[in-house]
Image: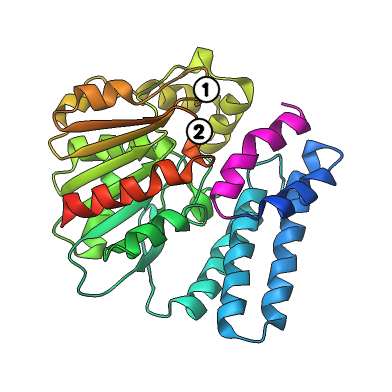
């Protein structure tokens, strides 16, 4: 994929995750080749670390740390020999942001997962935000914030092959085993799940197999992946996250909800963008139709992750999950 296409494809994703669109266009506009993506984004992130150090108030410093975390995370998306370093920097910056902006946030880690639990101790219910193939917990704090405003406790996590764990773990299709360990660590009797991109598959698979999932929502999640039809760049990402081509082929072959969808007993909301047409990825309409309590929301102009259509789904999904849980 050439530089111009990569910049265009990630614009909606980046701005939807909270990066300033003007800064994004300025940083990417100075690139001469895609191989410099990681370097440029890490430089932008360090600029926000400097602003945090110079800030007059804890709130301003915390906001700059949070922005730095997002820039570090997006540095991991392009060809980048320092991907592991960028992910670790994102994790550290997010921790420093929460120290200032939400001191009650708790870091919780276990086998194959790490993340932040936020929200009131006496919350009526707990939601878990699950990222996708090349994503991490630093990307979806707007989703977390929407759920927090509705009174839920929220655990935003990295799992196998994701975020800060990508350097030491690989993706796995039986994600319900990870979710089960997360629920154990949280001490919750039941939870709601929100999964984005490949996280949508993880959430649906978990809802079918983990009885403590009380409600689930997927956003741009695949119903099925077809290896031979995937674009070369996406295949490369799967290979990186799976630890090799053979493992990537096996993993992709397991991402299929045909048999699992009818086993999802809890309420399920499936959100898709009408412009999200990735070759080799079957969207969620079949999932919503086959799940006994499935509901389908398709935003016609929405792209992958619907970063260009936040008002058309985020509040609706947050209200739906909050209502389903409480």
Within the image, what quadrant is residue 285 found in? top left
The residue that label 1 is drawn on is 278
Of 54 and 15, the residue lying toward us: 15
Q: Residue furthest top?
A: 228
Sort mark 1 into few (<14), some (14-19) or many (20+) by Cα contacts within 10 Å: some
Within the image, what quadrant is residue 188 found in? bottom left
Q: Residue at x 42, y 35 (%)?
A: 198
Distance between the alpha carbons at the discs numbered 2 and 1: 8 Å
Do we see residue 173 in this rendering? Answer: no
Q: Residue at x 60, y 47 (%)?
A: 14
Q: Which residues are magenta?
A: 1-18
- Which comes sooner in the sequence, label 2 or label 1? 1
| x and y, in percent, of residue 56 in the image | 66, 86
Left or right: 1 with respect to 144? right
| x and y, in percent, of residue 229 in the image | 52, 13
| x and y, in percent, of residue 266 in the image | 15, 40
Using the image, tell me which numbered label, if any, was put on residue 58: none
| x and y, in percent, of residue 182 in the image | 28, 56
Do we see residue 102 in this rendering? Answer: yes
Using the image, tell me which numbered label, if any, was put on residue 304: 2
Sort mark 2 into few (<14), some (14-19) or many (20+) by Cα contacts within 10 Å: many
Within the image, what quadrant is residue 128 found in? bottom left
**Callout 2 touching callout 1 (CB < 8 Å):** yes
162 over 53 or under it: above or below = above
Left or right: 164 with respect to 261? right
């Amino acid at each position: 994929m050439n530089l111009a296409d990569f910049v265009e494809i990630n614009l909606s994703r980046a701005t939807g995750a909270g990066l300033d669109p003007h800064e994004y266009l300025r940083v990417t506009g100075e690139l001469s080749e895609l191989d410099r993506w990681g370097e440029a984004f890490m430089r932008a992130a360090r600029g926000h670390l400097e602003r945090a150090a110079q800030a007059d108030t804890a709130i301003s410093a915390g906001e700059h740390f949070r922005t730095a975390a997002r820039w570090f995370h997006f540095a991991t998306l392009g060809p980048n020999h320092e991907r592991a370093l960028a992910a670790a920097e994102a994790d550290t910056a997010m921790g420093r942001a929460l120290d200032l902006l939400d001191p009650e946030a708790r870091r919780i880690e276990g086998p194959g997962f790490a993340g932040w639990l936020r929200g009131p101790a006496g919350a009526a219910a707990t939601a878990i935000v699950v990222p996708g193939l090349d994503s991490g917990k630093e990307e979806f704090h707007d989703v977390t914030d929407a759920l927090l405003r509705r009174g839920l406790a929220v655990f935003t996590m990295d799992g196998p092959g994701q975020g800060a764990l990508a350097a030491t773990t690989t993706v796995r299709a039986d994600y319900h085993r990870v979710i089960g360990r997360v629920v154990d660590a949280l001490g919750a009797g039941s939870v709601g799940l929100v999964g984005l991109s490949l996280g949508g598959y993880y959430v649906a698979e978990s809802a079918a197999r983990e009885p403590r999932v009380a409600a689930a929502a997927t956003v741009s999640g695949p119903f099925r992946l077809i290896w031979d039809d995937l674009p070369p760049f996406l295949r490369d990402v799967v290979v990186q996250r799976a630890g090799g081509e053979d493992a990537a082929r096996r993993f992709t072959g397991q991402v299929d909800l045909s048999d699992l969808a009818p086993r999802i007993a809890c309420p399920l909301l499936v959100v898709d963008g009408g412009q999200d047409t990735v070759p080799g990825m079957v969207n969620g309409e079949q999932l919503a139709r086959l799940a006994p309590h499935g509901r389908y929301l398709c935003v016609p102009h929405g792209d992958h992750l619907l970063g260009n259509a936040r008002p058309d789904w985020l509040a609706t999904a947050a209200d739906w999950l909050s209502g389903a849980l409480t």
